[in-house]
Amino acid sequence: QVQLQESGPGLVKPSETLSLTCTVSGNSISGDYYWGWIRQSPGKGLEWIGSKHHSGSTHNNPSLKSRVTISVDTPKNQISLKLSSVTAADTAVYYCAREVIESGSPLNYYYMDVWGKGTTVTVSS
Amino acid sequence: DIQMTQSPSSLSASVGARVTITCRASESISIYLNWYHQKPGNDPKLLIYAASSLQSGVPSRFSGSGSGTDFTLTISSLQPEDFATYFCQQSYNTPYTFGQGTKLEIK
């Protein structure tokens, strides 16, 4: 059974960098999946942040791209998220998720079939 | 970005009722549409992918249809565990975007 568990500081100061880790169990992150991050806040609903394949291929959200770094650590079976220059608008519950790639035409289908429980991050001084 | 709009925003229904939730995309997304539901304090759970494919383990009372810009999620006979918030999500283009949610409550 695949399980994802987010971890990291629950409180980050404005202008600093938010750093989260997602530990994957029951599935190697070297498989043919993307591994991504999504956040949820009362004001903005669900917002997809981005995802990465172990090969290095990355899907980005342009609205966050300049501040986001997603990394895949295959030996540790972990993915990480770094979001720089945070403000109060970055306060949210952050989820990691597995993105399935299913062959389709003309495009592949992508969907998030396993999610972590989420971790709450508050940006405040 | 592709905007996803769900209707209604909230809905009250009784156990055993048939319920339909609508999702509209701001441009054509073919069938690159997924549905999730989420209970308070929990992570979202995948129900339907590619507009009409039922995720493994999801009860057959859930079904999805549509293509292009208009999609529906139907629950044929509501069960107590179905009361939750439902989200659609497009995977046609990055950034993937979600609808604002439809909260399904017990009548």
Image (cartoon, coloured by chain):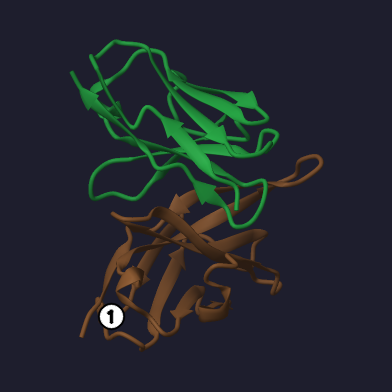
Chain colours: A brown, B green
Q: Residue at x 46, y 42 (%)?
A: B99
Residue farthest right in this picture: A106
The residue labelled by disc 1 is A9
In-image side of A4 versus A120 (left or right):
right
Whole-percent x, y for residue A101 in the image: 67, 51
Q: Secondary structure at mark 1?
A: loop
User: Tag 1, which chain?
Assistant: A
Which image quarter: residue B66? top right
Q: Please provide percent x and percent y for residue A45.
A: 37, 52
Say which of B26 and A101 sits in front: B26
In the rendered view, tell whether residue B35 sits above or below residue A118: above
Q: Give residue A124's quadrant in the image.
A: bottom left
Q: Is residue B100 left or right of residue B23?
A: left
Name the quadrant containing residue B75: top left
Residue type at mark 1 is Pro
Q: Is residue A7 left or right of residue A38?
A: left
The answer to whether residue A34 of the structure is visible from this angle is yes
B40 above or below A39?
A: above
Q: Which corner quadrant holds the C terminus of chain B?
A: top left
For residue B77, side relative to residue A60 (left or right): left
**Residue drawn at 60 percent across, 47 percent down:** B2
Residue at 46% from the left image edge and 55% from the top image edge: A2
- Tally the numbered discs: 1
> Residue A65 at x, y = what percent?
57, 74
Depth check: give the residue in front, A14 or B75.
Answer: A14
- Foreground of the two, A80 or A49: A49
Which residue of the protein is positioned furthest toward the bottom in this rendering?
A: A16
Q: From this view, report whether residue B78 is shown above or below residue B52.
A: above
